[in-house]
Image: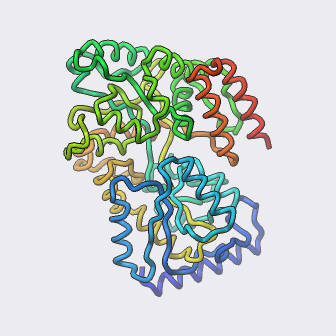
Amino acid sequence: MSAGARVRSAALLAVAAVVLAACGDDGGGGGGGDQPGGGTALEGRGPITFASGKDTSGNMQKLADEWNSEHPDEKVTITELPESADDQRNRMIQNAQVKSDEFSVLNLDVIWTAEFAANRWIVELPQDEFDLDQFLEPAVETGKYRDKLYAVPVYSDGGLMYYRKDLLDKAGVQPPETWDELTAACTAVKKLPEAKNTGCYAGQLDKYEGLTVNFSEAVASSGGTVVGEDGKPDVNTQEAKDGLNFLVEARKSNLIPQAAITYKEEEGRRAFQDGGLIFHRQWPYQWALANATDGSSKVAGKFDVAPLPGKDGPGVSSLGGHNFAISAFTPNKATALDFIKFFSSEEAQRSNLLATSQAPTRSALYEEQELVDKFPYLPTLLSSIENAAPRPRVVRYGDVTAAIQEAAYGAITGETTTDEALEQLQTKLEELTAE
């Protein structure tokens, strides 16, 4: 689109926004009414900033450089936030609460959409300007709040079970589909002299967002739910108890080694790459890093992936990923919108997949044979995403995830019983989700 066309488009959007505002708004979180930092219209052009977690591959900066070379008057600067998802969220919220224009585009965890939209920290986006039918439907839904689009899915995520294929082959066992099979496979592999001191299984079990993900997966993989589609919590159940008990008993039996309760994504990735784990629940980004041939990985070419195991069969992943949203407080919203279109394009997502092995949100990329040949886990990943269960879609997500982490960590570390943890969690979640 030419510069003149973009200006005319922004003007039309501005007129439309005025008309809609005159018709009234349902208060649904930023679609209408005045917005700080330039109003509701997606107008204003100039330099922007992009707030995101750590760029471990360098490809994010590469794509930003491409944008900057084509938009010398609308350059983007990446602001790297802390490694922890919780710390990233806190930094973005702090900026929004003081109406800071430091950030223009926000790289949001998929579960933050409702909270940021309801608080009017991000603005509604024009659905008709994105070919959403070309994206994975579960990913698109994570960008909506009250049926309005507030964020565009750029990275999706589904949990995968990484396993040491070389060790399993030597021990004569298949990738486990159930938790009992996981235990049996670990026992068999650890009889090998080279695996005797290797940890069996780890996920993300430190007290942060990753624990909410892993707890939710365990509950869903035993047939339960944390918060239902009706918005009501339902964790004081046998299914939820079975899921949490898997994590609790696995830690007691040392199936999950002691060190693993301190693991976030990166700690676990480094442990797996160093040959310290037989099985690792992780996101797809680990594939490229663990296969690096520069000496940073001891397991390159020695592992594969499978679906997560569950109680009675293959498990259920929590739906992960990241969406790009526009801060309500940035003055250059038109530039921010075009940047999101650029970054969510099929070309940019293909580039990112090739560089990082992260899950794209464009459906067509999962069908390209060249990509499947290079990333043979793509069919497994697609199934993981399509069958994934979302984390609780609630406005007070920060409080909800903190309550989940407190209950799950207490049970896993033996501070409380499973029954006590879930009973207390049910009560707390009912308070936090009450209308």
x 29%, y 54%: residue: 355
In the foreground, 127 or 327: 327
Q: Picture coordinates of residue 234 (x, y %)?
A: 68, 28
Is 158 on the left-hand or right-hand side of 352? right
Is 137 on the left-hand or right-hand side of 56? right
In the foreground, 305 or 371: 305
Is 137 on the left-hand or right-hand side of 418? left
x 32%, y 48%: residue: 357
Q: Report the number of numbered marks.
A: 0
Query: Which residue sits furthest right?
Result: 435
User: How is colour applied across the structure in the image?
Assistant: rainbow
Q: Picture coordinates of residue 376 (x, y %)?
A: 26, 40
Q: Picture coordinates of residue 120 (x, y %)?
A: 68, 62
Q: Picture coordinates of residue 302 (x, y %)?
A: 22, 32
Is 26 on the left-hand or right-hand side of 323? right
Which image quarter is the N terminus in? bottom left
Which image quarter is the C terminus in? top right
Work out whether 285 lies above or below 203. below
x 42%, y 61%: residue: 344
Work out whether 314 lies above or below 73. above
x 78%, y 40%: residue: 434
Query: Which residue sits furthest bottom?
Result: 4
The image quarter containing residue 380 is top left
The image quarter containing residue 241 is top right
